[in-house]
C-alpha cells in the first residue's frame, strides 16, 4: 500500500477515493495472496529447496541462543557494525560510492556501488543461487550499454526528445521494461513446467484432509483455503464495483477477476525471485497490474474514475503479492527451525487484516504532515507509479519491450527452471544493488571453495545474518522516528 496508494495523492486525487473501501479491498487482497501461495509451499521449499536468504537469516537468529556463544557473538557484533554504518549513511545522506567516475569509466556503465552491508549479507546467503541475477545486471550495463554506445543506438528521452546515455534513463526506458517482461515470461514458463507438481500438491492436501493423515495436520484444511480465496475474491469484486459511481457491475467484476488472476501469477514470480535472491520486484508487478486495470477502466469515459478505480484494485493486488512473499519467507524460517506450516499459515490469516488498517492511517498522517511527493517525503515508488499512469493515459506503454522480455524470459526458464526470473530481476533492479550484492555472492563462492561449507554454516551465515538484522533495525528506527515527528 505504501507503494501504490501515495500515487493517488501525487496525481491529485486524494479526495476522490474511499479509504475505508480501499482498506477492505486490501484486506481481501491479503487473504488472496496467502491463500494462493500456500499450495506452492511444497514446490518451492520442499522440492526446489529455494534459499530464501531472509528466511535463513531469521532462522539463524532464532537458533543462535542454542547454537553456542560464538555464533551469537558473531551475529550481535555484525548487527552492531551494520547498524552503525547504516546510521552514519542515513545521517549523512551518503549511500552510494561512484567508483566508476574515479577510475574513468563511462557514465553509462553505471559503476556506482550501494553502501550496504545488508545487501552483501543477502548475496552471501544466496550464494550460487544469485549468480544469474548478477549476470543479468552486468549484461545490461557492461555489455549492452557499451554496445549501444558503439552502435550509436542509445534511446531517446521522451521528456527532452534527445538521445540519452544516462544510466538511470537507460534503466527506466529500456532495461526495466525488458526485465519486467522477462519476469512474467519466466514465471509463465515455470508455472507451465511445474503445473503437474502444483496439481499434485493440491490433491495431496485434499487426500490428506479426507484421510486425516499427518500431512493434514501439517497443512491448512483445503476447504478452509477454498473458502478464504472465494470470500476474498468476492470482497475484491465488491470493492472494484463500488470504487467509483461510474463503475458498472460487469466492468467491476472483470477488474476483480483480472486482479485475482494476476495476484496468482505475480505471487509465483515474486516468491521465486525472493527465494533465489531475496529481492522482490513488487513495484514492477504492481505497475503491470495497474496498467492492465487502467485499460479495463478507461472505458468509463472519466479519467479520474478510471485512474482511481485502477489504483484501488491495484493496491489490493499489491498487498496480496507482498503477503505471498512474506508468508513464503516465514515458511522457510519455519522449515529450518521445525515449525508446523499449518500454524504459521493460520497465524498469517489471523494477522493479515491489521496491516492495511495501520498503513492507510499512516498514509494520511504522513501526507498531512509532509505532503506525499514533496521534497520532505518524495515517495519515489509512488512517483514512479504516478508517472507511469500519466504515460499510460497518454498512450505511452512499452508493450514491445514487455513482449520481447517475456519471450526471452520464457526461453531461459525452459532451458533452466527459474533462470528467466533470476536474470530478469538483474535487468529490473538498480545496478548499484547488483554490484554490491555481487560482493556477497563472490565471497560465498570463494569461502565455500577455500574453507568448505562448514565455515559458511559456523561463521559466514551468522555474520551476514547480523548484517541484515542490524541495517534493517536501523532502517525501521528511522521510519518510526519520521512517523512520530508527523504525529
Image (cartoon, helix red, strand yellow):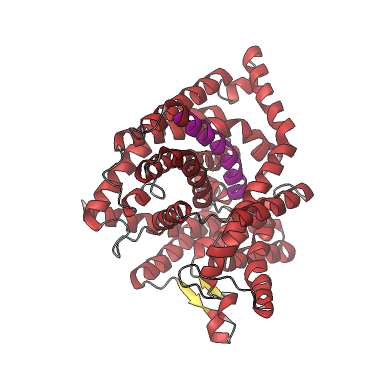
Q: Is residue 263 magenta?
A: yes
Q: Residue furthest front?
A: 301
State whether residue 57 appears in this view. yes
Q: Is residue 6 magenta?
A: no
Q: Residue 251 location in percent, x, y?
A: 46, 31
Front position in the image: 175 or 358: 175
Residue drawn at 67 percent across, 55 percent down: 404
State whether residue 52 appears in this view. no
- Magenta stretch: dominant SS? helix
Residue drawn at 70 percent across, 66 percent down: 446
Residue drawn at 67 percent across, 17 percent down: 207
Q: Residue 32 location in percent, x, y?
A: 50, 31
Q: Residue 428 location in percent, x, y?
A: 58, 59
Q: Within the image, what quadrant is residue 127 found in?
A: bottom right
Front position in the image: 332 or 193: 193
Q: How many marks?
A: 0
**Does residue 353 appear to the left or right of 453 in the view shown?**
left
Q: Which quadrant would the N terminus be assigned to in this image? A: top left
Residue 27 higher or lower than 16, as above or below: above
Q: Which residues are magenta?
A: 252-275
Residue drawn at 31 percent across, 60 percent down: 377
Q: Residue 448 location in percent, x, y?
A: 71, 61
Front position in the image: 309 or 269: 309
Residue 88 higher or lower than 316, as above or below: below
Residue 462 higher or lower than 115, as above or below: above
**Does residue 416 appear to the left or right of 427 in the view shown?**
right
Q: Residue furthest right?
A: 415
Amino acid at each position: 500500500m505504501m507503494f501504490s496508494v501515495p500515487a493517488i495523492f501525487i496525481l491529485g486525487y486524494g479526495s476522490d477515493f474511499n479509504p475505508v473501501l480501499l482498506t477492505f479491498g486490501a484486506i481481501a487482497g491479503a487473504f488472496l495472496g496467502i491463500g494462493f501461495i500456500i499450495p506452492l509451499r511444497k514446490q518451492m521449499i520442499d522440492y526446489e529447496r529455494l534459499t530464501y536468504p531472509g528466511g535463513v537469516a531469521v532462522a539463524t537468529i532464532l537458533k543462535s541462543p542454542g547454537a553456542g556463544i560464538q555464533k551469537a557473538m558473531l551475529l550481535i557484533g555484525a548487527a552492531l557494525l551494520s547498524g552503525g554504518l547504516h546510521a552514519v549513511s542515513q545521517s549523512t545522506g551518503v549511500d552510494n560510492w561512484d567508483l566508476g567516475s574515479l577510475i574513468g569509466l563511462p557514465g553509462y556503465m553505471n559503476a556506482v556501488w550501494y553502501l550496504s552491508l545488508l545487501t552483501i549479507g543477502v548475496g552471501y546467503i544466496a550464494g550460487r543461487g544469485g549468480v544469474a541475477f548478477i549476470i543479468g545486471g552486468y549484461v545490461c550495463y557492461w555489455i549492452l550499454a557499451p554496445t549501444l554506445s558503439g552502435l550509436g543506438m542509445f534511446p531517446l528521452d521522451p521528456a527532452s526528445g534527445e538521445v540519452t546515455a544516462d544510466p538511470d534513463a537507460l534503466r527506466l526506458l529500456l532495461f526495466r521494461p525488458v526485465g519486467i517482461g522477462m519476469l512474467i515470461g519466466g514465471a509463465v514458463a515455470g508455472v507451465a513446467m511445474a503445473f503437474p507438481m502444483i496439481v499434485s500438491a493440491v490433491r495431496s492436501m485434499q487426500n490428506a484432509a479426507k484421510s486425516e493423515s499427518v500431512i493434514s495436520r501439517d497443512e491448512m484444511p483445503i476447504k478452509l483455503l477454498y473458502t478464504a480465496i472465494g470470500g476474498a475474491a468476492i470482497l475484491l469484486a465488491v470493492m472494484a464495483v463500488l470504487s467509483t459511481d461510474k463503475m458498472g457491475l460487469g466492468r467491476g467484476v472483470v477488474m476483480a477477476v483480472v486482479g485475482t488472476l494476476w495476484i496468482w501469477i505475480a505471487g509465483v514470480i515474486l516468491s521465486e525471485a525472493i527465494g533465489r535472491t531475496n529481492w522482490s520486484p513488487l513495484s514492477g508487478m504492481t505497475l503491470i497490474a495497474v496498467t492492465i486495470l487502467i485499460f479495463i477502466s478507461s472505458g468509463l469515459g472519466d479519467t479520474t474514475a478510471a485512474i482511481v478505480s485502477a489504483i484501488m484494485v491495484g493496491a489490493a493486488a499489491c498487498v496480496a503479492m507482498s503477503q505471498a512473499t512474506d508468508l513464503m519467507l516465514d515458511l522457510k524460517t519455519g522449515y529450518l527451525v521445525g515449525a508446523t506450516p499449518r500454524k504459521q499459515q493460520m497465524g498469517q490469516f489471523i494477522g493479515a487484516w491489521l496491516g492495511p488498517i495501520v498503513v492507510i492511517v499512516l498514509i494520511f498522517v504522513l501526507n498531512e504532515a509532509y505532503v506525499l511527493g514533496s521534497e520532505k517525503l518524495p515517495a519515489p515508488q509512488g512517483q514512479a507509479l504516478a508517472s507511469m499512469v500519466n504515460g499510460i493515459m497518454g498512450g505511452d506503454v512499452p508493450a514491445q519491450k514487455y513482449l520481447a522480455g517475456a519471450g526471452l524470459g520464457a526461453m531461459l526458464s525452459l532451458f533452466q527452471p527459474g533462470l528467466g526470473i533470476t536474470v530478469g530481476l538483474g535487468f529490473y533492479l538498480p545496478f548499484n544493488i547488483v554490484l554490491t550484492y555481487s560482493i556477497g555472492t563472490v565471497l560465498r563462492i570463494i569461502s565455500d571453495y577455500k574453507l568448505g561449507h562448514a565455515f559458511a554454516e559456523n561463521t559466514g551465515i551468522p555474520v551476514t545474518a547480523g548484517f541484515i538484522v542490524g541495517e534493517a533495525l536501523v532502517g525501521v528506527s528511522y521510519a518510526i522516528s519520521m512517523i512520530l515527528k508527523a504525529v
